[in-house]
């Protein structure tokens, strides 16, 4: 999986750790050979996306969009949007570092692209276990 990391925020992004995380997940989950775009943005933009694509009001921390499941150099598997504003608030609230919060959100968003979900309790437990597993592997 090729990873494009795009940021339109003024916050530093742990690009190398994100790439290691995605590579680590790929070893276990075997996604198609393509590209994932991870876009770091602000609350204003993620609020717009949340409204337009989920009909939800206000900002959220992460949104994932599957785009193309086919393999190939020009194929974009999906995009993950992360609000650094919301991530910073969550990190402060939960008493963990900002970079760790970003890695957790990248993991969460990528697992969504790979088909994991958390609408049902059984799905939530499975996805949560995979998140924990992948984050511990790179710690």
Image: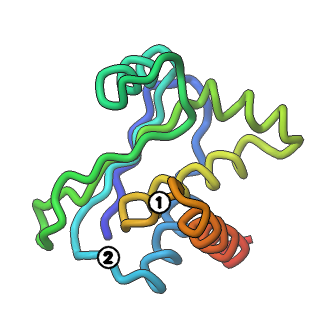
* Rendered location of residue 46, percent (x, y): 44, 25
How many numbered callouts? 2
- How far is disc 2 from disc 1 in space, using C-alphas? 16 Å
Q: Using the image as rendered, state which of residue 131 and residue 23 is in the foreground.
A: 131
How did the renderer colour the structure?
Answer: rainbow
Q: Using the image as rendered, state which of residue 74 and residue 124 is in the foreground.
A: 124
The disc at residue 31 is: 2
Question: Tag 2's secondary structure?
Answer: loop
Seen at 74% across and 34% down, the residue is 90
Q: Using the image as rendered, state which of residue 11 and residue 116 is in the foreground.
A: 116
* Looking at the image, residue 50 lies above or below residue 72: above
Mark 2 and mark 1 lie on one chain; the one further toward the N terminus is: 2
Seen at 36% across and 23% down, the residue is 55
Specify few, some or many for label 1: CA neighbours under 10 Å numbering under 14, 14-19, or 20 or more.
some
Q: Which residue is mark 1?
A: 117
The disc at residue 87 is: none
Are the residues flagged by discs 2 and 1 in contact, CB closer than 8 Å? no
* Rendered location of residue 36, percent (x, y): 31, 57
* Quarter of the rendering occupied by the N terminus: bottom left
């Amino acid at each position: 999986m090729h990873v494009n990391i795009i940021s339109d925020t003024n916050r530093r992004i742990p690009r190398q750790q994100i790439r290691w995380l995605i590579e680590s997940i790929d070893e276990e989950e075997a996604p198609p050979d393509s590209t994932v775009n991870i876009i770091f943005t602000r609350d204003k933009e993620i609020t717009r996306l949340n409204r337009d694509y989920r009909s939800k009001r206000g900002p959220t921390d992460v949104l994932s969009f599957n785009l193309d499941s086919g393999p190939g150099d020009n194929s974009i598997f999906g995009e993950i949007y992360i609000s650094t504003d919301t991530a910073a608030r969550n990190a402060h609230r939960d008493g963990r570092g900002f970079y760790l919060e970003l890695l957790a959100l990248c993991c969460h968003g990528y697992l969504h692209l790979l088909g994991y979900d958390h609408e049902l309790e059984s799905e939530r437990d499975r996805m949560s276990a995979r998140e924990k597993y992948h984050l511990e592997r790179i710690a």
